[in-house]
Amino acid sequence: MQNLEIIRMQLIGFGKFRDRTIELSPGLNLLEGPNEAGKSTIQAFLTGMFYGFFQPGTKRRSYTLHRDKYQPWDGGSYRGVLVCRNEERTWRIERTFDKDSESVKVYDDLTGDDLTLDFAYNTVTRQVQVGEKLLGLSKTAFNNTANIAQMTCASVAQESGFSAEVSDKLLSMMKTADSSLSLSAVIHQLDSKAEQIGSPKKSKTPYGIESLREKELVEELEEAEKNEAEYQNLCEQGKSLSGEIQQLEKEKSLLEAQIRESAAKELGGRYLKAQNLRVRIERIEKEQEKYRIYQDVDPEIIDQAQKRLGAKAQITRTLEKYRRALEELNHRIQELNNLYRTLEVSGADEETLSQFDLMFERHKNLEQLRDELYQLQIKKTNVAFHRSKLSQMDGQKLEEDMQEYRRLEQMKQEKQPEKSNTAGIFVLVFGLVFVLAGVAAALFGGEMVPAAAAYGAILIGIVASATGLILLLTLRKASGKGRKGESLERICQMQQDILEDYQLSHEVDPLACLEEMLGKVQVNNYKIKQFEEQENLLLEEILSKNQRVNQLDAEISAYLGRLTAKAAPLNEEGNIQESSETESVLEEQEMVWEEDSQPEKNVQSADEVRLKSLRESVNQAKRIRTDLQRLHLQQQQIMQEEENCKNQIEQINTSIQQAVDSCRAAGAQSADDLEKCRQGKRRLDEVSVELKLQKELLTETLGGYSFEELEQNVRSQKTGESDISPDRRETREKLAALNEKLSELGKQAAELEGVRRGREESQRPTGQVQAELDEVRSRCKKYQLELDAIALAKEKLLSLSGQLHRDFAPQLNARVSKAIERITNSRYSRAVIDQTLGVRLEDKKSGKLVDVSSLSSGSADLIYLVMRLELLDLLCGENRVPVIFDDSFTQLDDERTARLLSYLLEDKQRQILLFSCHSREREMLSLAQIPCHVISLNEQ
């Protein structure tokens, strides 16, 4: 189970807020503020940080109206930071909403690692999906469950897309135990696949294109079959003309050979040809002499050198790129160094920065110690207060006074004989009366009074008279003895003094009151002793924890000194030396505690506040150090590559210089002259070959004669053009006629070839068309099979969807029904929710199902709010995400609001953000003694 909690919101520029930071706590956070205080702005900020302001479910990147609505009022940067955590790590989300620089980055808030690539990338919004991963909800699901805005409780029933998403996700969770498997997504993929395939009637889809192509190929095949016979005839005519032309070409070649052979036999022709060859040879020899300086040039060496020149140019371009990259890196390193120097912790070393998380953890321990110390002080104050209410009395003295009072009471009784004599006289008179009555009854009663009764009365009277007489004699003797002690007035006065000491002078039974007071005093003294022992134990624990607090304070102070290059003083043992001010504060606190003064809650020290303020600076310093290390590593790599390039260029230059040296005899001075040398060498080789061929042709033309001998024979023969033989003239005429016939046949063959090529270009072979038609029909058949399979799969999935809804609907209905029965005080005990998230309630009185729309607005809001929360629990499973309420209780009365708050706070793992413009919720929470973190949005 993972519980996501929002720790901090930094509204750098968002709506009315500029550089506003809001710290949140686990559990319930109550954000109070009047209208226009920015409650809805903060709620929109949370949605924007998790999901951005993109329209969900669109194929193109588009935005909601909130993007323009919450542009910063001051026109500054439009961005914010959100810090949240779960059991895995603490996430820092940095998002910029500006159109020109819109971006989102996710970092580990403790280590500064860039985690952006760990999130899935959305190709439509061109940003990573932060909310989907951290919350496990789409934007639509988040806005309809965990994010409840003003007057939107019932909007959940109007979101058709959301109802489908909820049903789909719940079905997947119930049947596969994996909420990432989506039935609607599968159906959507099937529809998309079917849409991609298309149909024969949709000409722009693959299936439509193939169907249209099939029709075209059928028509093309029919046309090709019609024209195939004509094409075969053209091909045969072309073959016949080609054979005839080839035969004529052979005859032409023979005639030309006969003419050349006849002409070569004539002396005049041979002489003219030899004379031309001599002139040509002289010209070639002069040109050969001109290029003879290149005869020692090696073309392979020049080719290798030119290849190295090309490699050098490429390496030079690469080197220039490295130099530019190095300049950019140096510039970036300089910027980071300048930025690092501006940080307050720029003087700290790597080890000191790495200890920050440990010190921050100690700071948290220090806060916990302070809270414990504060609670101990409160306990000690309470104990001292209760002890002060108990007045300590001397129980021994009270016991002695009580014994003295008893003794005085006994003496007092001994001093009161008159009362005892009265009793004796009364008994004596009573006995005499009975004696006289018995005597009178015996003498005058006669038969009316039995003799036994008379004698019995006489006997009783005698016994009573004797008893009274004995009592009188005994008391008189005791009274005679007591006259020697204290007087009765003195005894009474002493008793009165004892009673006045204990304020019992008016009590009816003072001795009983003294005994009761003695018992109370003993119990009271025992309690006082217990309180004193408890107070001493608390004082010892307070002093121990305070010593630990001071030690942690000193460690934090020393660390801050190292962090900001201001080290704390050390004692001789090398430990942190506590300042005299700290010791005096400790002594003052001990004196205050000994005087039992009322404790005040400890506030954070300046060092702790400074430590928290430096957290962002330290994280930034760590990120800058990491970036600098990475940049320095890149710098070293680029410098190494640059050095390698320079070495390669140096090697290439050495090799090129060697090639230049080898061509120096040909006039090469630099690498630019190598191409000239290569061209000169190539031309020299060409001239040498041509000279050799011309000399061989001259030798063949002379036919064993020298040029002078041939010239002399020609002059002596004096033959002219008119002396050409008749055979040679006839051969030339045949050749002219043959050329005309070849020209005519060539035109016919060209026309025929043009027609044939036109047919080939305009009409493909029947077999090729048939093969393509078979392939197209095969693809059409494949598309149709895929469409049939998709239709069958959709039918099965939709039938499965209805069955699955009947499976999970009772679970959802039961959860919502239980919550609604509790919050409505059993007014409604059963809820029925359909597939579109419509709700109907069972009225206990009538037993009918009532649509929630027929209830009051307050009741409807309550029902939909409970349903949203239960849907959130079902969607998230064991995970917990923050729940946001923006004045969502405005239509509820106090009783239902109190029940709803109690229902919300049952889940101790969930973080709640409750926005309110009233004090009602805070008063209810205070009355119920429910802890909450109150944030006033009026504070700037």
Image (cartoon, grey):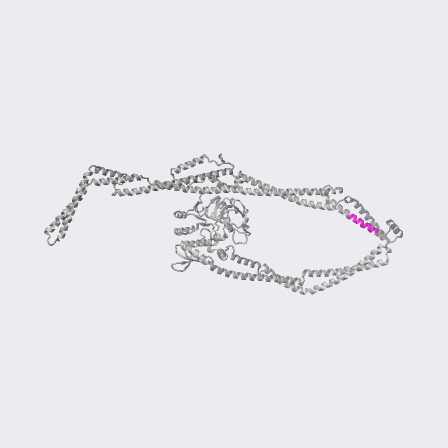
Query: For residue 493, what is the image quadrant?
Result: top left
Viewer-side residue, 3 vs 143: 3
Residue 698 is covered by the magenta coloring: yes
- Whole-percent x, y for residue 312 in the image: 68, 44
**Residue 203 visible in the picture:** no
Find residue 498 and report its image quarter. top left
Vertical position of residue 164 compared to residue 582: above or below? below
Give yes or no for residue 165 being in the magenta stretch: no
At 39% across and 37% down in the image, what residue appears?
Answer: 592
Q: How many marks?
A: 0
Per the picture, the main secondary structure of the magenta-coloured stretch is helix
Q: Is residue 528 visible?
A: yes
Choose between 693 and 520: the one closer to the eye. Answer: 520
Please tell me whether residue 676 is drawn above or below residue 784 in the rendered image: above
The residue most toward the right is 716
Is residue 672 toward the left or the right of residue 789 in the image?
right
| Location of residue 248 in the rendering, given as x and y in whole percent from the top left corner | 78, 60
Q: Position of residue 419 (x, y in %)?
A: 19, 42
In this rendering, would 210 be left or right of 418?
A: right
Q: Nearer the viewer, residue 924 or 79?
A: 924
The x and y percentages for residue 252 are 80, 59
Chain part drawn in magenta: 686-699
